[in-house]
Amino acid sequence: MFERRRQPLISRAEFLHRLARSALIALAIIVGSWASGVCGYHYLQGLGWLDSVLNAAMILGGMGPVNTLTRSGAKVFASFYALYSGLVLIAVAGLLIAPIFHRFIHRFHMELDDERRTRS
């Protein structure tokens, strides 16, 4: 997916394409996670669709649930969904930052290699 150390830096257009692809993957993960949360709250707690959307969004966003959960299955689901949401946050942040970080490090290594060549 990323160029190797000895390969030249990709063009700005290719970099933006790589960044857009990472953003689309991150968006798909968020939408899928949100949808699974909505279904879990709707079917396990019996909340309406709008309340399920709100609860799933609040948990996924790191804010916490809005409605009080009364069913045991819903409480178990909510605890696992909250832990999962924390991991999703880390994964999505990594997906979005990785292309930028890689380009920075790749450029840095290219400059170091240029300096080494001029000294030799």
Image (spheres, helix red, strand yellow):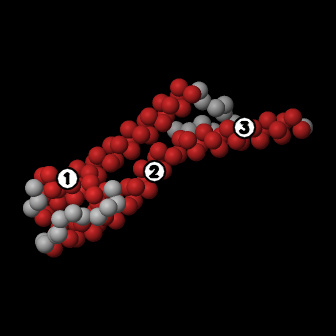
In the drawing, does residue 60 fall left or right of residue 87? left
The residue sitting at 10% across, 55% down in the picture is: 48
Coordinates of residue 69 in the picture (x, y in percent) = 16, 69
Q: Amino acid at mark 2?
A: Ala
* Mark number displayed over residue 104: none
The answer to the question of whether label 1 and label 3 lie on touching residues, with beta carbons closer than 8 A, is no
Q: Earlier in the sequence, mark 1 or mark 3?
A: 1
Q: Which residue is mark 2?
A: 93
The residue sitting at 29% across, 52% down in the picture is: 33
Q: Earlier in the sequence, mark 2 or mark 1?
A: 1
Q: Which residue is mark 3?
A: 110
Task: Decide: few, some or many residues near mark 2? Use Cα within 10 Å; few <14, some 14-19, many ≥20.
Answer: few
Task: Decide: few, some or many residues near mark 3? Use Cα within 10 Å; few <14, some 14-19, many ≥20.
Answer: some
Q: Amino acid at mark 3?
A: Met
In which quadrant of the rendered view does residue 83 lie? bottom left
Whole-number angstrom distance, CA of label 3 to CA of label 2: 26 Å
The answer to the question of whether label 2 and label 1 lie on touching residues, with beta carbons closer than 8 A, is no
Kindly report which numbered mark, 2 or 1, lies closer to the viewer in this rendering. Answer: 1
Coordinates of residue 113 in the picture (x, y in percent) = 77, 39
Under tag 3, what secondary structure?
A: helix
Coordinates of residue 101 in the picture (x, y in percent) = 58, 45
In the drawing, does residue 29 fall left or right of residue 12? left
Q: Which residue is mark 1?
A: 53
Q: Is residue 49 above or below residue 70?
A: above
